[in-house]
Image (cartoon, rainbow, N blue to C red):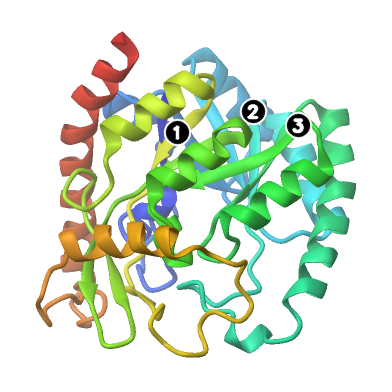
Amino acid sequence: MRIGLSVYGTTFSMGIHPGAGRPAISPQQLMDQALASGLQGVEFPTTLPQNEDVAAVADYARERGLFITLAASGYEPAKLTQAIQLGKQLGVGTVRTMIGGAKIGGDRRLMLGRWQAFLQEVLAGLREATRSAEQAGVNLAVENHQDLASEELQWLCESINSPRFGITLDTGNPLATAEEPLDFARRMARYIKNVHLKDYEIYPSEEGYRLVRCPLGRGVIDFPALLQILAEQCSDVTLSIEIGALEARHIRVLADDYWPEYPPRSAAQLARVLRLVYNNAKWSDDWQTPFERNAPVADIVAYEDEQLATSLAYMRPVFSQAQQR
């Protein structure tokens, strides 16, 4: 296992967010920041190297022993094939994509009656794109991006049945599809190609709960147990620190119309996730991030940077201990 740095947890600090008002970080600058933080790789979107010498970016990473994970989106084969070819040029191990369909927060209500047809479209597109990944020698990994549940990701992996196809596990996002994170990781471990290390604080609401970003180790994810699962079942995965989005995610699992498009779940499954929620609940109305409170850009940048520094300080010894087992 190797840990890197994703741009998505610090989008203001790195100039990725359009409201940041600063130039976007370059791939080389991101790699320098990862090295300065004692990390071993980076994850960035396909747009970041658009105006760069791709061969030079690849050489920069290779000479420093850094891995690159490339972040794409969607399930359209031609678009994914372009990302895969860029990934091959960059020497990446994995191209991650996200599917969508549901609104962020696991909300499928706008897809009522259309979800199964949507999944068939996704399967067809990813199956074709996986052929390109096989030819390029690159992994294609679908993230659980608060949209697809483990049952559906498992179905995709079994249906496509390729060693070059799997998932990117976002460690916090199972909570958005009402799944206990370690249960999710155990179920999907054989298919994991890449991991986003993310933690959440949980604030209950009348309809369910809100997921609010926090530094790694300050929320509900049991990272030592998670890393043990990964070390035992998929020890060659790449991981990236990716603190959550600047907007809280409202997971409305107690709403009457939340469940119709979800796979059947047992009472025991739901009990496990609700036990995690209520054992760690923060009963407060003060859950908004500086971004949600319309704070100045400098305050948002400072908030991101402090959370990244805290995450790094927590994760270094936890990861070192996991590697020694």
Separation of residues labelled 2 and 3 (CA atoms): 10 Å
Q: Which residue is mark 2?
A: 93
**Sooner in the amino-acid sequence: mark 3 or mark 1:** 3
Q: Quadrant of the N terminus?
A: top left
Q: Which mark is residue 323?
A: none
Residue 279 horizontal side relative to residue 179, left or right:
left
**Going 40% across and 64% down the picture, which residue do you hit?**
270
Q: Nearer the viewer, residue 109 or 319?
A: 109
The amino acid on which the numbered mark 2 sits, given as a three-letter code, is: Gly
Please name whichever residue, 263 or 35, is drawn nearer the observer in this view of the structure.
263
Give how far apart the Cα atoms at labels 3 and 1 are: 17 Å
Q: Earlier in the sequence, mark 1 or mark 2?
A: 2
Disc 2 is placed on an element classified as: loop
Task: Pick whichever, 88 or 22, lies toward us.
Answer: 88
Q: Can you give x and y, in whole percent of width and height, for residue 5 in the image?
A: 39, 38
Specify the quadrant that holds the C terminus: top left
> In the rendered structure, which amino acid carries the disc numbered 1?
Leu
Furthest residue toward top: 324
Q: Which residue is mark 1?
A: 239
Q: Look at 72% across and 76% down and name the residue there.
A: 115
Tag 3: amino acid: Arg
Residue 21 quadrant: bottom left
Residue 60 relative to residue 101: left or right: left
Label 2: few (<14), some (14–19) or many (≥20) C-alpha neighbours in 10 Å: many
Dot 3 corresponds to which residue? 164
Disc on the earlier residue, 2 or 3: 2
Do the residues under discs 1 and 2 have CB atoms within 8 angstroms? no
